[in-house]
Image (cartoon, rainbow, N blue to C red):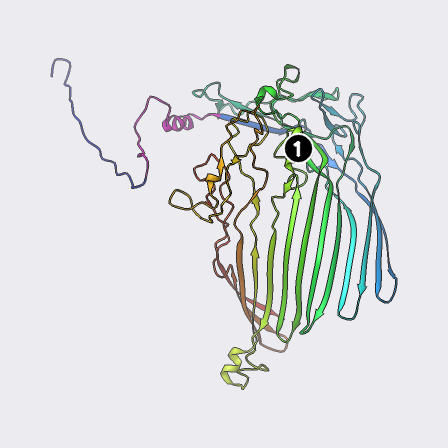
Amino acid sequence: SGPRGEFDFGGGVTALNCPAGTIGCPTTGGAPAPNQFNAWAQFLLGLADGMGRSEQFIKATAKEWQFGFFVGDRYRVSNKLTATLGLRYEYYPLMTRDGAFQFDRLDFTSLNVLLGGIGGNPSHLGVTTSKKLFAPRIGLAYQFNDKTVVRSGFGITVDPLPLARPLRGFYPLTVGSNFAGTTSFSSAGSLSTGIPSICCPNINSGTIPLPPQALERSVGPGELKRGYIESWNLVVERKLPSNFLVSLGYVGTQTVHQFGDLDLNSSLPGTGASGQPYNKPQFGNRTASTLFWQGFMSANYHALQVSVNRQFSHGLMVKGAYTYSKAIDWTDDDGWAGLTWNDPNILRRNRAQAGFNTPQIFQLAYVYELPVGEGKSWANGGGAATKILSNWQVSGIFSAIHGQPFTLLASGASLNAKFQTQTPDQVGPVRKIGGVGAGSQNQPFYDPSAFAAVTRPGTGPNPYGNVGRNTLFGPGSVNMDFSLFRTFKVTERLGLQFRADGANFFNSPHFNNPNRNFTSANFMHITTAKNDERQFRFGLRLAF
């Protein structure tokens, strides 16, 4: 103590209980580096790390016409052969905008957005559509006898995808901007001042520069190639005893000019952002995706299909189907479909089995009226037992479905290419272990030691990795849905039905594909499952 006051010194010990298996313990102490309290202070002060704003600058609702004309005839060639012939013609004029301009597209040489009907620009900006979309169809049915029929057919179907779906919402229809602080310690703005306004382009000239960070999808000049699907089949149907009908068939389809995106601002291996074609001063050093949308891809599907059907009679109905198939494409979906690899030198590498390819599917559905109660084989003598056991039915759907493919991913660090994908290298035979669960205490689904990181530089041989697209299959699934129901006859015109339904009756787990990221600690481990656990539902239905 002294003339200026009193000093107290003390100390203490605090013990924190760390749960077993954890790494480190959470603390609330301060630190010289920014921590969670900075974020809390920012929240109290109304300061934001980042802000974003997007505005519909022009209401340019798309307007499209689709025309179709069809002629057909059915011709009885003989007592056993029937032919069905048809020809369809379709025409899809180019869409127009209901707003300030009629159409818009990007000039890929100058990166200027052209607006149709403004500043002397033609309304359709040099984009045309085909007037030769003829779609012939033919079907043949030959009856060998009263129990056997052979059917075959071929037809073309034009893809009716409206252009408004893939071409909506891009600059200048929508104008957006993001704001961030200049450093990690500064804010982008405050809640009191709000999100800054954004500049809107001047469209009077009909030509406006594309902002460097605006995502853009556009068609090019010339004909927009609309896709079409060629389909064919050959099916044999045979009627069997006990009212069973069996069919065995081959089904095939081929898609020509499937719509998709090609990113023209992707770079080649080893060149990084500096190798992007539009990352130059004359284009504003653009690094964002620049998507050219056109029908340039293809796809096909081939399948063996078997079905067994029995209409409801003598208390039993059966419907079964088995499919053994393969689907190949460049990318899945249509309209918003990007490629795995945009390198023009390896575009064909995108062609592989489709992500939705399911090689084998077996399904069996049934409805069975229990043979007990009034008018049945058992417990039909009357009394309480007959009343309780009468009019009960069971039904169910059993399905066994093969897994679907997935693509492995690597870090891409050695690839050093924008808007490209790198896969690992396969260095050994792929061994399926079939494990489920994360962490070292659980087995992986596939042996991860069969793969290695790509260490070659982007300028080396095969910098993308030697594993292709959709090369491995995830787990399949088995499921059983079961129902029990009974109909009570209350009066001559009034009936009451009781139902008990069990979805996924045996509560079979249906797992998702394993982790496909090579850099993850859970690579090749299955860590998630579908949310389709067992559920029961009970209901009453009154019919009058």
- One can see residue 253 in this view: yes
Query: In the displayed image of the protein, which residue is found farthest to the bottom?
Result: 381
| Callout 1 amino acid | Leu
Q: Give neighbour class at mark 1: few <14, some 14-19, many 20+ (Cα, 10 Å).
A: some
Q: Nearer the viewer, residue 462 or 350?
A: 462
Quarter residue 467 falls in: top right
Q: What residue does disc 1 label?
A: 347
- One can see residue 170 in this view: no
Q: Does residue 481 show up magenta in the picture?
A: no
Q: Which contiguous range is marked in magenta?
A: 22-49
Q: Quadrant of the N terminus?
A: top left
Relative to 94, 2 lies left or right: left
| Residue drawn at point x = 71 percent, y = 19 percent | 110
Q: Nearer the viewer, residue 111 or 170?
A: 111
| Residue drawn at point x = 66 percent, y = 44 percent | 328
Looking at the picture, how far across and down is residue 425, in whole percent?
Answer: 53, 34
* Residue 389 in the image: above or below residue 345: below
